[in-house]
Image: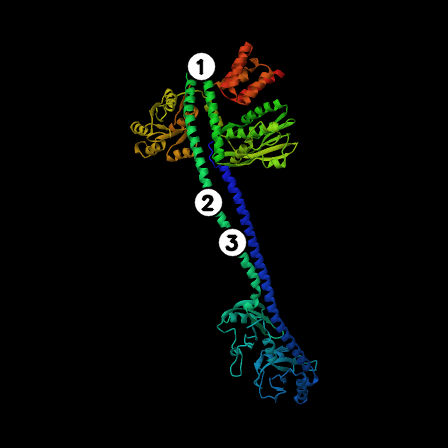
Amino acid sequence: MIKGNYSPSDTKMYSSRNLLIRFILGGTTLIVSISAYFSYQAARKITLEDLRGKAFLEVQKGVDEIEEWLHVRKVEVQTLAYTSTVRSLDWSVAEPYLKSEVERINEFFFFQIVSPDGSYFNTKVGRANKNIKDRDYFQKALAGKSNISDPFISRSTGIPLIAIATPIWSNSPISRSPIGVFQGNVKVDHIAEVVNSLHYGNNSYAFALNSQGEAIVHPNSMLMSTLEKPAPSLLKIPDRNLNAIAQRMVNKQQGIQLMEIDGTKKYVAYVPLREANWSVALVIPRQNIESRLQFLDLIALIVGGLTVTMIAVLWQVQAFEQAQLKKSKAAADTANHAKSEFLANMSHELRTPLNGILGCAQILLRSKGLPEPEQYHVNIIEQCGSHLLTLINDILDLSKIEARKLELHSQDVHFSSFLQGIAEICQIRAEQKGILFVYELASNLPTAVHVDVKRLRQVLLNLLGNAIKFTDEGKVSFKVEVIERLPADGQTEKYRIHFSVKDTGIGITPTQLDNIFLPFEQVGEKKHQIEGTGLGLAITRQLVQMMGSDIQVKSQLGQGSTFWFEIAIAEASEWVESAMAASKGQIIGFEGSPRTILMVDDRWENRTVITNLLQPLGFNVVEASNGKEGLEKAIALKPDLVITDLLMPEMDGFELIKHLRHTPSIQDVKIIVSSASVFEADQHRSLQAGGDTFLSKPVQVDELLHQLECHLDLVWIYQQSEKQIINSSATTLDSSSDKLTPPSPDVLRELMNLASKGNFNDILKWADKLEETDTKFAPFANQLRQLARQFDEDLILKFLIEKENDYFL
């Protein structure tokens, strides 16, 4: 890997650290600002309510004073109405008595006795020539209800008065109706004095309204009634705000409200009376109340200023950090670009000769005339080439994980056989350590599944390998079961499968649990740590997360650990057909007329591989060394299918595909893009340009033939006289294994260890060594050699385990 002066991990660490600083500063500022704002709002609201309450109490105090004064006057009138003098209705007797009471009480303007017909006598004019039967207060009193009237202009004196009227009852128990009305009239002066005394700071004033919304007391004389001009009702004036307040006062509501009065914002506190149908209001300039909030407003201003200052500071920090990150990103991008370019070039350069090596090996293996010793050596060539290809792919996988571009590639597999192979590998490793391995397989598992076999095997072997690695005594348990059957996706059934690995090993501390999934982290003693790089669990977890789940773990130090995960797996419905197709034998041709294939590649070895693979099967293969030549031959020959490389001189594969798709006579030709490029971006780009499928180099024969079968609708012709070695190997295992003489258990265990590691070269060496040691081992060595040449470690392990068990039967 190419490294520049600036590492991407340093960029990430630097960015994360400064992001944390900004988060702390910004979060603190935000929390303090929000707290201060809400505290300010709460304090302001509480203070304002307190000040409003005090203003309201000022009005309430005046109302209470008026209420008390009216109540006393009302009681005095009712008391006089019950005296025998008043109840006699004899004015000659009552007049001197009532005049003396006016002087004694000194609150009433006069007393008055009214007959049921509305005629009356009072202490000011004696017998009056007027009639008051139309007065509301008289009608209420004659109906038996004491009441206090709205202020009115006296008909006998012409003075604004308030009548306190009460019924006069007869001494006779037979009479149930009042025999007259007694009233005491008072001037408005005392009410006006109390109302005018109400103040709450400069320029505040009070007023009182009667039941009709007319002013009883008001500093504006235009709103007061006179003998010549009745007072206008505030319910009918144009001022909407005063009109609204008057409506609330007439409806005997109470409260304090901020509104516009006389062109400025003012508070209006209003309280109704209980003894009379009146209401008193106090108008207070806004500043008289809210001036006491200036201290809180000053604090809010200071906090706001600090907040703005902090935001400005953070803004500058952010701008500085962005500038630094841009520089860092530019350096990292340069390094990553160099790394990517290096990987692309090296991959292409390595895969190109490797394509020739593996292609030629596959061509030779398909040859009928190749003697068995030469086949053995060609097998070795193919095995080494495949191993080298695996190493390249592993390195690229690590790069993909780093770039988060690793993809899953699912295929059909017999589920129980797949799991059994994994279990047998781990069984051998467990026996080598002298611990018990328990394999529990649920009975309701699907027969075959569609899953990324390579990645799932990698996950399970890593978890099981770790469990065995960190368990020195006791056992390791591997359990697979169905949790639930998921809703079908179309015609495909899905299962949620639970995988768990439990051990009785050294366990993990709570502190270590937080780190075990980090790259290059290892726990436990040094003797365990030297067995790995510490990358396994990190990659394993990423793979499980790509499968739509996550690895869970619980552990107790000294007692062991349990790792588990659950993934949704689709049931494979066509795995039998796939297996049967693979077992039909070697393809020797296809039905129908010959097909023309145009092979476009600038490397002769790549063209040779394809030509030598396809021509013996009946294909007419035409070669072109670059895109320009390929386009000319495609227009002239109109091939059935084009196989093209991407990186070529004069005209690359992308341009060739573009021209093919825009040439009417050949625009529908099938195109297979074959390249050694390792980047999905190139693969996707080639498909977007018009390619039908992508074929990675080195070319695998089975994959090439499969793509040709799909694109050209071919029906293959198989060689019927031969069967695949793997079938004969399996038959031999089933029918003739008892005729083989195996070596000692120690040798068998060594062979198992080599098979579990995939070391087929050493297995082949052991086969030769056994055959040379004693001819009785020749059948066993020959069987072992055939299995090793198929590179199927599961089948080899099964064969060796059966031979080992023969010793104990």
Point out which mark residue 323 bears: 2
Q: Nearer the viewer, residue 121 or 752?
A: 752
Per the model, the C-alpha gap separating discs 2 and 3 is: 21 Å
Q: Quadrant of residue 665?
A: top left
Hey, what amino acid is under mark 1?
Answer: Glu
10 Å crowding of disc 3: few (<14), some (14-19), many (20+): few
Give the quadrant of the C terminus: top right
Secondary structure under the numbered disc 3 in the rendered image: helix
Q: Where's residue 24, x and y in %?
A: 55, 47
Is the residue 395 above or below the residue 773 in the image?
below
Q: Where's residue 104, x and y in %?
A: 68, 84
Give the mark nearer the N terminus: 1 vs 2.
2
Q: Are marks 3 and 1 in contact (CB under 8 Å)?
A: no
Secondary structure under the numbered disc 1 in the rendered image: helix
Instruction: Please report the residue visible at 54 percent of the width from the left and 49 percent of the height from the top.
Output: 25
Hey, what amino acid is under mark 3?
Answer: Thr
Per the model, the C-alpha gap separating discs 3 and 1 is: 83 Å
Q: Nearer the viewer, residue 543 or 679?
A: 679
Instruction: Please report the residue visible at 66 percent of the width from the left and 86 percent of the height from the top.
Output: 103
Instruction: Please report the residue visible at 43 percent of the width from the left and 37 percent of the height from the top.
Output: 334
Give the mark nearer the N terminus: 3 vs 1.
3
Q: Where's residue 71, x and y in %?
A: 65, 76
The residue identified by callout 3 is 309
Q: Nearer the viewer, residue 546 or 353?
A: 353
10 Å crowding of disc 1: few (<14), some (14-19), many (20+): few
Point out which mark residue 374 bears: 1
Residue 92 located left or right of residue 3: right
